[in-house]
Amino acid sequence: MKTYKIIMPVIGALMLVGCSNRNNSSDEVLQSIPFQKVTLQDNFWLPRLKTQKEVLVPFALDKVRPAMDNLRKTGNYLNGVKDELPFPHRFVASDLYKVMEGAAYLLTLEKDPALEHTMDSIIDLIGRAQEADGYLYESHTTGVSANHEHWGGAGMGDKPYSWVVHSHELYNMGHMYEGAVAYYQATGKDKWLKIAEKNARHINHVFFEGDPKYNGGKPVNQAPGHEEIELALVKLFHAAGDSLYLNMAKRFIDIRGVTYKPEGDGVMSPSYAQQHLPVRQQTKAVGHAVRATYLYSGMADVMAQTGDQTLRPALDSIWANIVDTRMHITGGLGAVHGIEGFGPEYLLPNKDAYNETCAAVGNVMFNYRMFMAEKDAKYIDVAEVALYNNVLAGVNLEGNRFFYVNPLETDSRQAFNQGVKGRSPWFGTACCPSNIARLIPQIPGMMYAYTDDEIYCTFYAGTSTVVPLKKGKVSVTQQTEYPFDETIRFEINPEGKSQKFAMHLRIPTWAGTQFVPGKLYSYVNARPADWKLLVNGEEVEATPEKGFVTIDRTWKQGDRVELRLPMDVHFNKALPQVEADRGRLCVTRGPLVYCAEAVDNTAMPASYVLSPEAGTSVKKADSGIMRGIDFVTVKARSVQEEGNGSLTMVPYYAWDNRGDDAMIVWMADNDELAKASIPTIPEYISDVKATHTFDQDDVLAMVTNGYPASSFDTSIPRWTSWPQKGKEQTVELTLKRPLKLQSLSVYWYDDKGGVQVPESWTLEYKENGEWKKFPIYVTDEYRVLKDQYNMVHPGEDIMAEAFRLHIVPKADAAAGILSVQIEEVK
């Protein structure tokens, strides 16, 4: 196995937290060992980093070329070079910055002159697109936003900082700061860092001092609608050493919910972007889940750096509210479609779960920061569950296909991922792949923390590092096959012959009576793991405090520590308040949630009945894409088959790597529920009509077809407007009853000739007999992509009696549809 040696950077590193804790309950400061000072030597994370470098980052850089083109065109505009204007978009640049951040981290694995050259070239584009005063936002700089249909409402405004609640101007810059800091750490080059600092000083001037060019000269004094800049400013503060940036971060947090409160519903609801109350008065997780976790991360950073303990009660209350009432067992947050966010307490659906990958990334970020502030392992336990389950499920094992939405159940007909059946190669809103690209390389920097005379071992993986304790450096080497093997071994080598210090080893929550902290989930027939701690081969008695066992002794070179965490297979139950999980069981092992896929089982996964008394076995796959992954087999029976049998399950993070089909996490524990869980197709439609239907086609096909094989699937019937080339068409779907819409998806037909995906389309809905414009969700678009469902969500609650699609074909082609799917809010 190849070992990558992390290259030492020019300056100190800054990982997820990138800061030390100034105000622990102990007087000693807790600091992290940065990612570039940890060498990975394992079979779980190291292959992923290699995949990141060889597949994900090059693939992602290619996908974000439109953002590069926008920067180039903006730079040309500013420099008087004749060129096309950029296309208007609020946040496409942020995806580029996140991919670049991930690339910067990978440059610490091994030198890559070609990648570094690519990065430098993009940084040149960024510099040329920045205005002289530091402003950087392509749509406003070039004026293309002024006449764009989304300039107001949930759009970008018609001029700089005129619609901060949704423009993403500060969100984009936050991601730019994080990328610039990462590249500075990786290479020592400061050109991008200077661009970031110039912009940050500009924002401080405009928002908190006032500039005649912006907002009539008055300070904008408004927190951004999408949080991100708050935590990014803390990173910039550490990289640049300028306290201005830390003060800005605190000020943005202090004014949230104070100087501006939106009025309205949906994306303009005061709680959508956590603007309903001043942050210190907030007690529950509400609104858009990604925005929320970014805010909470920034609050934790500011608390740690400024010593502002007035933020602690709100953070503690919000954290408890999440783990007690609003988190899926996979660590997923934001269960509700529409707002991509938190719904009512205990509303945790399975098939209809949203659980955006970015929200799980935010869950990791928030909890790691809380650990750094409070030295409590419960935060690492939550971060670990979110990381190993929801985050890793967001990218396939090959590193080139992704999930945006992460349901806990799918059926064979379901378009479960933003209109795509299975994983997508990319998204129109590409925040999730780019977030994965930047998070995974930072994982080594989450594995160790220290004070003057303490070492905290947080995440477990085969690693080596040197911990700079006050009385001397200590070399730590860790060997383990975690998360599949129970044994974790450490070799300790103090710089001198001996040295007194304390080692804290995390005893995960899953080794006790429940899988993850909080009140939501517990083991059935709980039997706490009989974990063992040995020093130089002799068992040591220890009692965990705040989730850590402590070995405080004088250490000698070559001392060995062994921690054994038995990984029994557990059956989990949820609180009865979680309606979706009543009468259901979830299987876990170690930190991993398991699920059943159709590919491994003879009957439909949802048809199986589990018993907590059932026997289980574990077997490691020895070939194929799943090689090295532990499968769990559970004695079970299917209501579709006679007799008893078994159910094969895989880690949730590894599902949908062998085909797009049915999957389930929460299994029925009784026949009645299993029978009811077998998927059926809802029949909402009473009538379908179109302005024109080719006489060899069927207008009803679009509502009766199963999932098409492709846009050129000629094995199933279809609707087309052939031979009416270039003529606008209308398709009207009348419902049997009014329904509250969750999403509507269209699968276009394209025969690569006379019928092609259309130029564009829009949607109307009928309410109380009146046709109304469809209020499309803020990050959705009317897409015309081939070989997948093109999904739109309503940006506000609507009750529809019918839908009408207005289709504009290409000038030389007719339009066609293979399938339309309508999902109801349940």
Image (cartoon, rainbow, N blue to C red):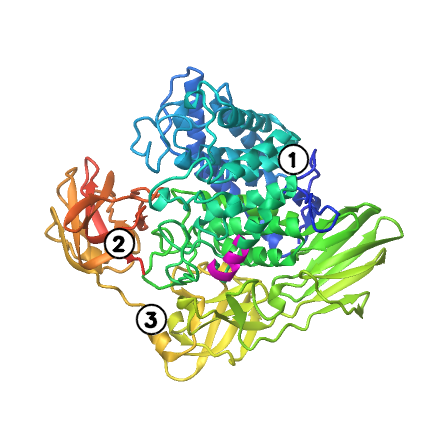
Of the two numbered discs 2 and 3 in the rendering, the one whose residue sits closer to the viewer: 3
Mark 1 crowdedness (10 Å alpha carbons): few <14, some 14-19, many ≥20: some
The kind of secondary structure element at disc 2 is: loop
- Name the residue located 58 percent from the left edge and 57 percent from the top edge: 384
Q: Amino acid at mark 1?
A: His
Instruction: State which quadrant residue 772 falls in.
Output: top left
Q: Position of residue 507 (x, y in %)?
A: 67, 63
| Quarter occupied by the N terminus | bottom right
Q: In what element is the residue under mark 3?
A: loop
Rendered residue at 39%/32% (across/down): 163
Q: Is residue 177 left or right of residue 6?
A: left
Give percent across and percent down for residue 31.
70, 46
Question: Crowdedness of circle 3 by 10 Å Cα count: few (<14), some, many (20+)?
Answer: some
Residue 319 is inside the magenta segment = yes
Q: Earlier in the sequence, mark 2 or mark 1?
A: 1
- In terms of secondary structure, where does tag 1 sit? helix
Q: Which mark is residue 414?
A: none
Segment colored magenta: 318-326
Tell me the number on the disc at residue 713: 2
Q: Quadrant of residue 106?
A: top right
Instruction: Tell me which amino acid carries mark 3.
Output: Ile
Residue 788 x, y percent position in the rendering: 32, 50
Marks 2 and 3 sit apart, C-alpha to C-alpha, by 27 Å
Visible in this render: residue 100?
A: no
- Please tell me whether the stretch drawn in magenta is mainly helix, strand or loop: helix
Q: Are marks 2 and 3 in contact (CB under 8 Å)?
A: no
Q: Residue 305, can we see it? A: yes
Indicate which disc residue 678 carries: 3
